[in-house]
Image (spheres, rainbow, N blue to C red):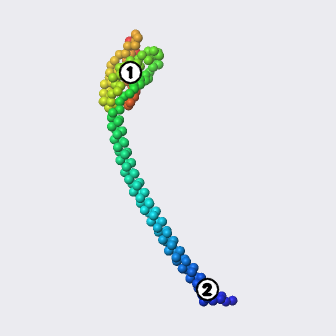
């Protein structure tokens, strides 16, 4: 069996030439459209990278300003409240009224600290502690001595105290 020589016929030659020419034109069209899309996306990516870089610089600038302002504000913070916690209430046998009177007396003793800068109060914290420990608190007919166990200082001055009865 023999394959007919179709390559010599003009119709088949035009058909195959059209397929090859169409393939070549299609390939150039694909390269042109793909190249223009890639160019568009590359410029878009570069533009966004620049924008992201600027935003990162601005963020860094704003964060540094924010931290500086927080430090300035922190320096200007003031003591707004005093909290007193008595740790050995049961051991010292403090009843409700005596407990509240003693707490009120300690707060009154530290009343000058309110609305002072935290920085200045922290510089004189040892003076505050010694002032409380050297004072005798007279509640009714009983005298109490106070020992400062812990002191936390921020916008609220928290004192943790141990109380002793003095006879």
The part of the image, by quadrant, that contains residue 4 is: bottom right
Q: Nearer the viewer, mark 1 or mark 2?
A: 2
Would residue 146 be seen by someone viewing this image from the given angle?
no
- Provide residue 90's location: percent of width, then percent of height: 47, 19
Quadrant of res 72: top left
Q: Which residue is mark 1?
A: 107
Q: Quadrant of the C terminus?
A: top left
Q: Residue at x 30, y 27 (%)?
A: 124
Front one among 138 and 15 = 15
Q: Decide: marks 1, 2 in contact (CB < 8 A)?
A: no
Disc 2 element: helix
Examine the rendered structure and indicate whether residue 44 appears above or below residue 113: below
Residue sitting farthest toward the right: 1
Q: Earlier in the sequence, mark 1 or mark 2?
A: 2
Q: Is residue 25 left or right of residue 87?
A: right
Q: Residue 131: name its quadrant.
A: top left
Image position of 62 with respect to 41: above or below: above
- Per the image, label 1 sits on a secondary structure element best described as helix
Residue at left 39%, top 25%? Answer: 82
Circle 2 residue: 11
Q: Please rate how many residues cluster around mark 1, counting C-alpha atoms within 10 Å: few if below 14, some from 14 to 19, many from 20.
A: some
Q: Residue at x 45, y 64 (%)?
A: 40
Q: Percent from the top left, x then y, of residue 150? A: 39, 27
Where in the figure is residue 37, as x and y percent of width and height? 48, 66
Question: Looking at this rendering, what residue extends furthest in the top direction?
Answer: 141
Image quarter where the N terminus lies is bottom right
Q: Position of residue 57 (x, y in %)?
A: 37, 51
Separation of marks 1 and 2 at Cα, in angstroms: 111 Å
At x 56%, y 82%, the residue is 17
Whether residue 85 is visible, yes or no, is yes
- Residue 83 vertical position relative to residue 56 in the rendered view, above or below: above
**Viewer-side residue, 30 vs 148:** 30
């Amino acid at each position: 069996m023999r394959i007919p020589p179709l390559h010599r016929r003009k119709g088949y030659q035009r058909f195959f030439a059209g397929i090859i020419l169409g393939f070549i034109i299609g390939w150039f069209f694909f390269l042109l459209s793909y190249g223009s899309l890639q160019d568009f996306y590359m410029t878009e990516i570069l533009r966004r990278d620049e924008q992201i870089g600027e935003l990162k610089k601005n963020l860094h600038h704003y964060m540094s300003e924010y931290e500086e302002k927080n430090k300035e504000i922190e320096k200007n913070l003031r003591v707004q409240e005093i909290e007193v916690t008595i740790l050995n209430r049961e051991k010292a046998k403090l009843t409700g009224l005596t407990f509240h009177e003693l707490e009120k007396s300690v707060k009154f003793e530290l009343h000058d600290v309110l609305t002072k800068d935290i920085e200045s109060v922290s510089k004189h914290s040892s003076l505050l502690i010694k002032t409380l420990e050297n004072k005798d608190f007279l509640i009714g007919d009983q005298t109490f001595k106070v020992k400062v166990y812990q002191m936390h200082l921020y916008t609220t001055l928290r004192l943790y105290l141990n109380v002793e009865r003095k006879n």
